[in-house]
Amino acid sequence: MEEARTSWPLKILVLLLFAFLLVPVLVVIPLSFSGENTLRFPPTSWSLRWYGAIFQNQRIMSGFRISATLATLVTILTLAITLPAAYVIVRLRTRGSEFLYNVFTAPLLLPTIVLGLAILIIFAPLGLLGTFTGIALGHLVLTVPYGIRVTATALAGLAVPVEEAAATLGARPLVVFTRITLPLIAPGLLSAAALSFLVSFDELVITLFLAGPRVSTLPFEMFRHLETRSDPLIAAIAVLMIALTLGAVMIVHRTVGLSKSFAGGR
Amino acid sequence: MAQADDMHTASGRFGLVAMLLAPIILVNSFVFLLPILNLFRISFNEALPGGGIGPGGTLENWYKLAEDSYYLEIMLRSVGMSLLVTLLALLCSYPIALYVHRAKGAWRTFLFVLVVSPLLTSAVVRTYGWIAMLADQGLINNALGLLGFSPLRLLYNQTGIVIGLTEILMPYMILALLAGFGRLDPRCEEAALTLGATPVQTFWRIIVPLTAPGIALGCLLCFVLCVSSFITPRILGGGRVFLLATEIYDQAIVTLNWPGAATLSILVLVIFGAALVVYTRAVNRLN
């Protein structure tokens, strides 16, 4: 009965729509093995030359190094900022906890193009444009809201009696936190870290407003490259980025479950 | 030990809360609240040539927006294109969402992962994938050539942007639809079919009304993301299609007219507000 409800025309339609949804990501994989000088799909010859070209492109390599450092730093800062805040919001139930939560997650409601411009205007007179610090601060606008969402969810899912039992048995608040709370929410923290890393590593719009000639990220360099030419170099980088993303997703999936990290999942 | 005892006093608790919240409040104020408030202020400042910001209290930027037909044109283009993309994304997402909603167990999880996987791929990569599809030597035109058709210009114009944005926004639409499909009980459909309704009648009279809240939410999300999207329109439009988001960027980075860019940003936020009002009204009518 269940199967019969989905008719064959619908199944074929769904298959075609899934193909439409996934084809732009899938097409990049064979394209990265193209042996041609320009973009042509399907390629008429195959090679690994574009993977080699990544390592000879100084701008891309420098962008990758900066992006990796930046994402790591931003992730550490995000955890350091959001964990205490989430603790206050979820555990201490301060007056206005909900208000604070809404204010801290509000940046996600605004378009990044507006955030980027707003930050540019504030940063320019402070000399923060084109600096590592400036871009890191710009990324925190996005990673902190995601971080607070995930850590608050993790803390809210933790049974309070466990903490209370430890406190009753004489453990001081800091000991309760480090010995009981922290290990129990470790999966949530790992998931928040993976998400922050990905968001920072992939961020482009805010970076476009804040990056400069000396400091630019990998997505920024890819964007600049694409504005002038569309050779298969970007495909090769894309495949490496997808592999990195898959690794991070596996971490999130194994520890917390993918659907919980997205609001829409049940 | 003295510190632990302090926690129980009101002032000690306040101190602790302040200490724990200090970093996030600092970051939130400095990189979010202050810049956004400043953006509103700047939209009333005079723009000086060469990137300067003149004295405030002027409505000049807003007059320019209202008088210059160029701005009306890009606004209409942005809004019109976003409405079209939203409609296309809805049409393409609805069957997928319905299918995923009806799927069970591991198959459902697998399909769900397929739906969210594009979200985890950077916008630059997905846009590049569309270049490979739409370019003169891309998959679509090469396939057309094999079949003996003349090639189509799909890239560096609005067609390419609409195709690319539809696909890029589909995961958001599907997630919103799925979130709203909770009310859809298979027994209602079965009842309708048992009582003699045709599948088409069942779809329009039962399934669509029950899933309307999800449709409304998905359309709001899609429209808002589309109006403010920058990377995909910029790359697939090749800098030749002028939209609100691309204009904000150009004024901020190329012509260095920050008050002008700020005014356009506020306009985008006003469009967001208008979309939210339409959404709220639609949801109220549904209830």
Image (cartoon, coloured by chain):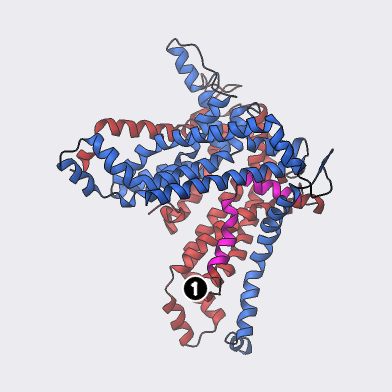
Chain colours: A red, B blue
Q: Nearer the viewer, residue B141 or B160?
A: B160
- Percent of width and height locating residue A231: 61, 26
Judged left or right of residue B177, residue A76 is: right
Disc 1, SS = helix
Q: Is residue B15 above or below residue A193?
A: below
Whether residue A65 is situated above or below residue B87 in the rendered picture:
below
Q: x%, y% of residue B169? A: 49, 39
Quadrant placement of the N terminus of chain B: bottom right
Q: Is residue B121 magenta?
A: no
Q: Say which of A11 and B68 sits in front.
A: B68
Hey, which quadrant is residue B264 in on the image?
top right
Viewer can see residue A203: no
**At 62% across and 43% down in the image, what residue appears?**
B268
Q: Is residue B199 left or right of residue A57?
A: left
Q: Dot 1: within a 10 Å radius of its alpha carbon, few (fewer than 14), some, or many (20 or more) residues?
A: some
Q: From this viewpoint, is residue B74 visible? A: yes
> Disc 1 designates what residue?
A181
Q: Which residue corresponds to the image point at 64% horizontal and 61% vertical from the top-left?
A: A77
Magenta residues?
A98-121
Is residue A112 covered in magenta? Answer: yes
Quadrant position of residue A234: top right
User: Hey, what amino acid is under mark 1?
Assistant: Thr
Magenta part, dominant SS: helix
Give the percent coordinates (x, y) of residue B271: 58, 43
Residue shown at 70% from the left, 51% from the top = B40
